[in-house]
Image: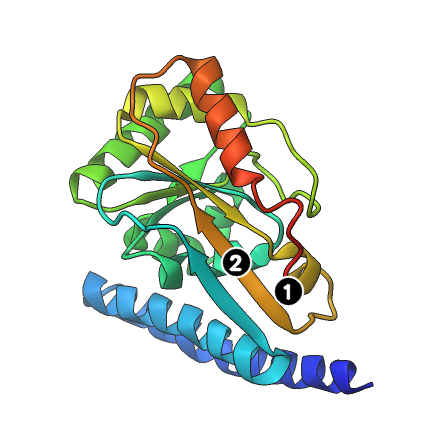
Amino acid sequence: MMLFFRNLAFYLVFYLFSPVYIIASVVVMYVSVPLLRKCVRGWCNFHRWCLRVFIGIEIRIEGEKHDGPVFYAIKHESFFEAIDAPANFNWPAPFAKKELFLIPAWGWAAKVYGCVPVARTEGAKALRAMVAAAKKLSAQGRPLVIFPEGTRMPHGQRGELRAGFAGLYKLIGVPVVPVAVNSGPLYHHRLKRPGVITYRFGEPIPPGLPRAEVEARVTEAINSLNDTPAA
């Protein structure tokens, strides 16, 4: 019963005040990109605060982050790591489904912020557009963020990497940092549970490796917490 009321408080506070950040982001994007960054990061930190205060979820970091032009390949177990990216990295450029950019106001704000649209069904043309956008953002010193499995996977389950990931790795030409995360057991369900969510940052993988090798190394690294449920 206590878990139910803690979740109720989380959902009420988080969703009651989230529109404030969203409206502020839509307004300031016409004025200043740095202000937009602050609004987005503020919302993500507010999400972390709500999880810590109402649910009892803490975040632990293992390994070393690498700010700058690197390509983060992150395990995707829940919406947690998607929401958390702007709080976890310094002005990241996330890859996001193209459909999300069709959302009124939000879609335009995402473009201004620097998200990269992913059109999964448009083939080589879409890949070229993604590479061009990613290279431009990487040249600004921003880290790129992608979920290479393409969808959420239950904790402990390995998914195949999307074919586009290898193409992006080859054509963008920056190191890949694989990141494992075990958010699923605590965050995936409607009733979120207290505990510790761990990010485990792997060693950077240099550009230019054969597809089979980079895919094997990324797959192994992002699944390194599969046998480690959130505490």
Q: Residue at x 28, y 56 (%)?
A: 91
* Image position of 116 (left or right of 152): left
Q: Secondary structure at mark 2?
A: strand
- Which residue occupies the foreground of this view, 52 or 123? 52
Q: Residue at x 60, y 78 (%)?
A: 56
Circle 2 is placed at which residue position?
A: 198
x, y percent for residue 131: 32, 27
Residue carrying label 1: 231
Task: Establish if 150 lies above or below 42.
Answer: above
* Element under disc 1: loop
Q: Where residue 41 sits: x, y (%)?
A: 35, 67
Q: Quadrant of the C terminus?
A: bottom right
Q: CA distance from mark 1 to mark 2?
A: 9 Å
List x then y, in percent, for residue 173. 26, 25
Q: Is 170 in front, or is 66?
A: 66
Name the mark on residue 160: none
Callout 1–callout 2 Cβ contact below 8 Å: yes
